[in-house]
Image (cartoon, grey):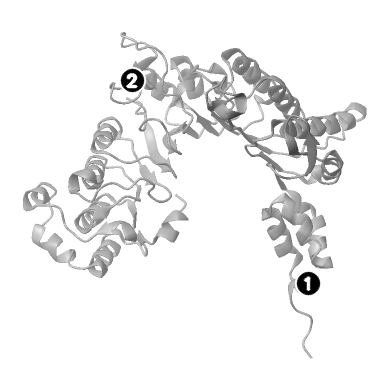
Amino acid sequence: MEGPSGFKTMPIELLEDIFQRLPVKNKGRCSQVCRQWQRGFNSKLSWRKFTFQDGIFVRRKYTQHSGWQYHIDHWRLKNLITNTTSSWRTLNVEPVSNIFNLYEFFRVLANYSEYYEKFSSQDRPMAKIHTFNFKWHLHVDENETGGFIAGKDVGTGGQILHSLKTVLNYLHGLKSLSLVDLQLTHDEADDFLSTLLEKFYEKLTYLSLLNVTLYPKPLLQVGCFLKLRKLLVSPQMLSTDTLSAIACLEHLETLSIVQVTATPYSLFPPTSSATDSFVFQDEKSSQSTDICRNAWDMFVKQNMDRTRVWLILRGKPKMSLIIQPGAPIYGIKMENSAGQLTMELAEQIANYYGATLRHFIQCGLERMKRGKKMEERVDSALIEIVSRCPNLERLACRERMSYGTAVILSVYAERIGFGLWIRKNALLKRICWCRLDMEAQAIHFDWLKARCRSEELVIVTIQRNTNQMNPVLDDKSYKSLCL
């Protein structure tokens, strides 16, 4: 006779891992399946990560000015915070459309912590939270304001900012902090960062500050967190003084300059002196600043190769990748963005970062497809990078390329010794290179032509040259590729 089987016999460790990944609003429903699932729901491990977002712990309420609205249910929220806060290790706040609900969540959370800490210095409900991620994105539609305000993104400030600072004040064990798109005024940003610095200057090991200010402003405070190991900042937050402070951080391993959708494209006025903090790119691109070569030379001398510098492009920025002349760029990454590699960008990368570049990675799938003609594709730009960056270690490209380009990349991968990953569905059945081009690359044209007769032959050639099992991936595998 067979023993019991099914969901009720699922190991409690597996259930805890499943419940940890479920949205909050689905955990309660799953806990009603059986007693075993209820034990998984009540386990502390299943509540290690909590994410606040729209639609959780709300109830319908009628208001005269807006009709039926979903407002926070204080009774359910109070029970949640009372029973699970001590289990939280990661607290995430996703962008919301109802500001009042977010404010009430912060207020109840702060009042709960204040009540316990007021009577006992040992009982700190949120002291075990080591990671806090806050994302803000509020778009005001023109129709919602009766036409008085044009549709635009609105930053934080006022009571929301005050409640955020209050909650952060009770996160005594915080090690990792991420704040995205706060878009504060200059005075608010200085006051807010000064508060963070006073509380966490010797605690944080990971700090991500992206688009903290509504308008560009260099922030010196980011270089004063002494224990940082990884720092992510927006390009408009850097200056010569900021770089100098960052260079002196003894524990900093990675500095990432992240360019996102909301990164401003109209920044400081142009400067004429070569020693000024900022210089402009050409006027064809949006007027975005980069830091001058002298500042980066000073950074290299002060830092003594302790920190690896990355350029990261995310989302749909208003401009192409901002090049930092003279920076010791270790890697360039396009994370699920609409950014594309052009010949102009490839020449700038090769000119400025040829001796230091180790990684060029395009994550995700291609969002904006270009034409199939040779001059419209990425082929020449890729060959420009691999031929002029002798220290390259990893190259991942999601864009269309010909059979010939893929085989040439594998030849350079064999010469230099870098890892290569490309998309199978992005390969075009053509060579697109002439005999003179191959002579310049020291590759026999007849051999290249023979290798490009079929897709199977191209894949086998790439595998043999790169000594990799799967350098040519399908879209699902490439999308899940973590580099």
Residue shown at 37%/43% (left/top)? Answer: 359
Q: Quadrant of the N terminus?
A: bottom right
What is the number of the mark on residue 8?
1
Outermost residue, top direction? 273
Give the image location of residue 84, x and y in percent. 81, 46
User: Looking at the image, is mark 2 or mark 1 earlier in the sequence?
Assistant: 1
- Is residue 468 toward the left or the right of residue 414 in the image? right
Q: Nearer the viewer, mark 2 or mark 1?
A: 1
Circle 2 sits in a helix, a strand or a loop, which is it?
A: helix
Question: For residue 188, what is the image quadrant?
Answer: top right
Cα–Cα gap, marks 2 and 1: 64 Å
Amino acid carrying mark 2 in the image: Arg
Kindly tell me whether residue 121 is visible in this rendering.
no
| Badge 2: residue crowd in 10 Å (few <14, some 14–19, many ≥20) | many
What is the number of the mark on residue 154?
none
- Is residue 82 toward the left or the right of residue 285 in the image? right
In the displayed structure, 404 sits above or below 91; it is below
Residue shown at 35%/51% (left/top)? Answer: 398
Residue under pointer 2: 293
Give the image location of residue 442, x and y in percent. 12, 51
Residue shown at 78%/72% (left/top)? Answer: 8
